[in-house]
């Protein structure tokens, strides 16, 4: 009762409040009346009063881009009087400098047509304050416009490079710790004329820059110019979601935060951060961009040594060989490790300077990097050399690279390695013998056979044998013949299962038959022990018991009890001549009583006869 | 009467197959002669005509690769050596020449993951047959266990081992087929090919791909192909500049 009264009173107050609320009104404010080109300003149109409002769908002012960014609704109760208001937000981006006038806009509120006041916006031509929060870094930095909350920085340690030279690059991205950033798109180095390796995050630390704290994430990568010329590396671009304070309707009206000691116009000195209940922050997606960095790329000088494969950097080479004592034709594995700093993707196996008397097989390689981006490390090559004649040392291996510091080509050679080769000369073409099916080149096709003493990097000969059957690229599991072949084991499995089921059924039937026979034999024995049966019934049952017992004793032969005669039963139980005679008499008497009718009518069997018959039957085992 | 008809049809069929094979042998011999005489373009035409007719064999692709090598087209030479190796994994001549062609072209190779490196010791076909055999042995073991009243531990162990072998073979097929030598492997045949971030010639370059470089085709959009690159990045290349190894 009390609760109903309270609800009624509250509803009455609210109704009265709405009833006596003011008539609709509209206001419009700019978050800032003086900005520079490139900055944005917020326009808020606030409609107070009951009923729905329809804001202007489009506000067009020459020289400015104005976009609606959303709306919010507020309810307030003051001294039992309620009021509601809707605020429509717009973002204004001036395209040029000048003094702009935003004309009055018509807003429909219920049945009323309201007009906003005329607003004036002064746009300056050049920034009135530095755009980056890291002025000390000069042109390499740029902060997110107006927010001063994040920055990206691209650090290229050198201004010139050679085509193909690996240049290490560092990217630093700083975030004000209070914006709680979430990267949507990781940093990416834009620009043309170079290739960049995958970015690796190398660390995170806190720094104070210009009196403001930043969480700085550092990424490392490396770039390599693809052609000569002047390039701009970058800018680095990334996208992140950050928490920013809501735009203020009255700029400069906020109080200075106690944390903003130096009046740096820190957005986070907004009361939102000092008083969380004053205003709610919002997540906004921002693009973070650094300044590009100029890089001059020079072409490699001409007259590269023959063993130069494009390696640029600074390298050292060590060589070893195993085994050092072999027979002619035996393989010797030469391991060459090239260590240093440079573009290892262009570091190829060192060349054999004098291949006469040697057969060289294609080398294998593996690379172990010592840093995050693979600029420094060790590339190890294993080359198999096979001597075709007696030798006392391995041929010299040469590796050439371009040193960008010395600005010249450098060729390093292996130390002479003494070996011992025993035995006579072998056939020139070792590789040909690896493939038994490959015939030697014929006179009809005088194709060049490999000669280890002729042209070392020449390809092997043509193969003149064409297989009788064509081959297919399709894996075997996609071919019909494969699935057709599966029918064979499938049918075998089905056959096996059917055979097993059939066997089980047969075994089951046999078991049932035997159980029935056992049951019948027990029943008949029970009857025979009673004295109430007529002679005809008695002998019929006695002979039947013998037949059933014979069938049971026949085992796997599975004799039908209906076809058992005295001889079969005697044979089955291996009876002696007396027992055999007894059994014959029993069957004869049974037949007489059954078919002759001589003994029809009432009659009795002597107890002696019963005992004999019972003994005979019980002894049948 | 009917039997005689079948016999005649079978004879005609065998005769036509035999004559086709003889013709292919003659074309192959002519292409080889062209190669030996230094007429590499004619040799290329001859080998490619055989391939168009479906006369695929590792040796034909190997010889075609040699002809392209001699003609100075290292990208297509590498492509055809790779095709020869796709048909016959253990083809020493193709392996040797492929390495030489790669050295000449400075071609980039896709890096195989560590399981793939081990699994590449056998072919997909060998794994397929292994999987099939293991499956059927497991099926027979299961049937025997179902229909036999007494379940032996040996039979159960065999079943489990065969199931493991089957699963391992299927994993190997999956790993090899989607790996660096799988069905998506393609070879860059064009010159001055740049992998780019987007499907435009003006888009930023990710990697310069010398002819013969390996890429893995991920998808195709119009005239552009999205590929996995040897440096573990991804990029777009013009579709005409790369050919799949498997036909």
Image: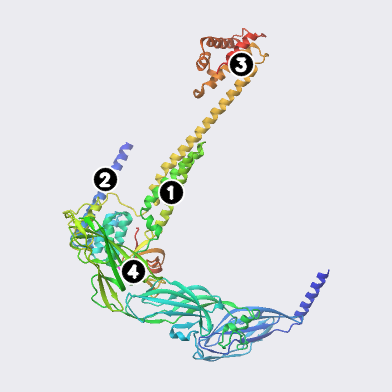
Of labels 1 and 2, earlier in sequence is: 2
Q: Quadrant of residue A543?
A: top right
> Where residue A374 appears, x then y in whole percent?
38, 70
Q: Which residue position is annotated with label 1?
A: B165
Is any atom of residue B209 visible in this view? no
Q: Nearer the viewer, residue A440 or A369?
A: A369
Label 1's element? helix
> Where residue A602 appears, x then y in whole percent?
67, 9
Q: Quadrant of the C terminus of chain A?
A: top right
Residue range highlighted in magenta: A342-347
Residues at marks 4 and 1, CA–CA distance in whole angstroms = 38 Å
Residues at marks 2 and 4, CA–CA distance in whole angstroms = 55 Å
Q: Which residue position is annotated with label 4?
A: A345
- Label 3 in the same subunit as label 4: yes
Q: Which residue position is annotated with label 2?
A: B15
Q: Quadrant of the N terminus of chain A?
A: bottom right
Label 4's element? helix
Mark 1 Cα shell of 10 Å, populated few (<14), some (14-19), many (≥20): many
Mark 4 Cα shell of 10 Å, populated few (<14), some (14-19), many (≥20): some
Q: Which mark is residue A541?
A: 3
Q: Is residue A367 left or right of residue A27?
A: left
- Label 4 in the same subunit as label 1: no
> Where residue A133 appears, x then y in whole percent?
50, 84
């Amino acid at each position: 009762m009390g609760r109903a009264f309270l609800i009624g009173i509250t509803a009455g107050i609210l109704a009265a409040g709405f009833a006596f609320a003011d008539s609709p009104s509209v206001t419009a404010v700019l978050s800032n009346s003086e900005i520079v080109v490139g900055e944005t300003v917020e326009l808020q149109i606030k409609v107070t009063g009951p009923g729905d409002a329809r804001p202007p769908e489009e506000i067009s002012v020459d020289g400015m881009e104005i976009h609606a960014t959303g709306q919010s609704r507020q309810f307030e109760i003051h001294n039992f009087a309620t009021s509601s208001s809707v605020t429509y937000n717009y973002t204004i981006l001036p395209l040029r400098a000048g003094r702009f006038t935003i004309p009055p806009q018509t807003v429909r509120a219920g049945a009323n047509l309201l007009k906003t006041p005329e607003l004036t916006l002064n746009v300056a031509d050049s920034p009135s304050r530095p755009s980056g929060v890291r002025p000390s870094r000069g042109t390499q930095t740029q902060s997110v416009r107006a927010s001063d909350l994040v920055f990206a920085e691209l650090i290229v340690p050198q201004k010139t490079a050679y085509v193909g030279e690996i240049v290490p690059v560092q990217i630093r991205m700083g975030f004000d710790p209070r914006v709680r950033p979430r990267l949507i798109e990781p940093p990416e180095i834009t620009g043309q004329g170079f290739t960049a390796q995958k970015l690796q995050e190398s660390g995170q630390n806190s720094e104070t820059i210009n009196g403001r704290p930043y969480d700085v994430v550092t990424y490392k990568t490396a770039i390599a110019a693809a052609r000569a010329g002047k390039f701009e590396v970058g800018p680095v671009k990334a996208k992140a979601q950050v928490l920013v304070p809501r735009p203020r309707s009255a700029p400069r009206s906020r109080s200075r935060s106690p944390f903003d000691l130096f009046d740096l116009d820190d957005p986070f000195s907004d009361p939102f951060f000092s008083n969380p209940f004053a205003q709610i922050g919002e997540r906004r997606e921002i693009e973070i961009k650094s300044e590009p960095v100029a890089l001059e790329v020079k072409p490699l000088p001409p007259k590269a040594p023959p063993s130069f494969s494009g390696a640029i950097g600074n390298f050292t080479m060590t060589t070893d060989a195993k085994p050092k004592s072999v027979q002619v034709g035996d393989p010797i594995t030469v391991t060459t490790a090239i260590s240093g700093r440079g573009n290892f993707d262009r570091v190829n196996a060192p060349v054999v300077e004098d291949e006469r008397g040697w057969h060289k097989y294609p080398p294998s390689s593996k690379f172990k990097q010592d840093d995050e981006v693979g600029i420094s490390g060790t590339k190890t090559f294993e080359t198999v050399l096979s001597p075709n004649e007696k030798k006392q040392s391995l041929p010299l291996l040469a590796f050439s690279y371009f040193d960008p510091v010395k600005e010249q080509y450098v060729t390093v050679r292996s130390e002479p390695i003494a070996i011992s080769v025993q035995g006579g000369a072998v056939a020139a073409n070792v590789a040909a013998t690896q493939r038994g099916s490959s015939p030697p080149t014929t006179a009809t096709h005088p194709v060049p056979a490999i000669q280890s003493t002729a042209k070392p990097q020449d390809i092997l000969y043509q193969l003149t044998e064409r297989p009788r059957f064509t081959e297919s690229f399709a894996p075997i599991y996609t071919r019909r013949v494969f699935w057709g072949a599966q029918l064979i084991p499938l049918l075998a499995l089905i056959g096996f299962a059917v055979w097993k089921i059939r066997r089980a059924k047969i075994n089951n039937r046999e078991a049932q038959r035997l159980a029935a026979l056992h049951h019948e034999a027990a029943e008949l024995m029970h009857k025979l022990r009673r004295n109430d049966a007529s002679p005809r019934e008695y002998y019929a049952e006695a002979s039947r018991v013998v037949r059933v017992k014979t069938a049971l004793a026949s085992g796997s032969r599975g004799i039908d009890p209906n076809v058992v005669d005295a001889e079969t039963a005697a044979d089955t139980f291996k009876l002696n001549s007396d027992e055999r005679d007894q059994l014959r008499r029993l069957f004869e008497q049974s037949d007489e009583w059954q078919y002759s009718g001589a003994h029809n009518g009432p009659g009795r069997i002597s107890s002696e006869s019963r005992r004999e018959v019972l003994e005979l039957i019980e002894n049948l085992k | 009467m009917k039997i005689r008809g079948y016999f005649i049809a079978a004879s005609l069929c065998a005769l036509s197959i035999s004559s086709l094979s003889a013709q292919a042998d003659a074309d192959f011999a002519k292409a080889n002669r062209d190669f030996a005489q230094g007429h590499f373009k004619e040799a290329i035409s001859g080998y490619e005509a055989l391939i168009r007719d479906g006369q695929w064999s590792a040796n034909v692709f190997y010889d075609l690769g040699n002809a392209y090598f001699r003609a100075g087209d290292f990208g297509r030479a590498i492509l055809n050596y790779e095709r020869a190796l796709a048909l016959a994994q253990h083809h020493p001549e193709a392996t040797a020449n492929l390495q030489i062609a790669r050295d000449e072209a400075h071609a980039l190779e896709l890096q195989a993951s560590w399981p793939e490196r081990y699994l590449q010791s056998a072919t997909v076909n060998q794994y397929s047959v292994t999987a099939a055999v293991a499956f059927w042995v497991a099926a027979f073991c299961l049937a025997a266990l179902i229909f036999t009243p007494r379940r032996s531990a040996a039979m159960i162990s065999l079943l489990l081992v065969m199931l493991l072998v089957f699963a391992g073979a299927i994993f190997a097929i999956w790993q090899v087929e989607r790996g660096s030598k799988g069905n998506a492997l393609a070879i860059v045949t064009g010159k001055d090919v740049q992998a780019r971030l987007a499907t435009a010639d003006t888009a930023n370059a990710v990697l310069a791909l010398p002819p013969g470089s390996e890429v893995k085709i991920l998808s195709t959009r119009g005239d552009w192909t999205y590929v996995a690159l040897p440096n573990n990045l991804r990029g777009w290349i013009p579709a005409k500049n790369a050919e799949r190894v498997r036909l």
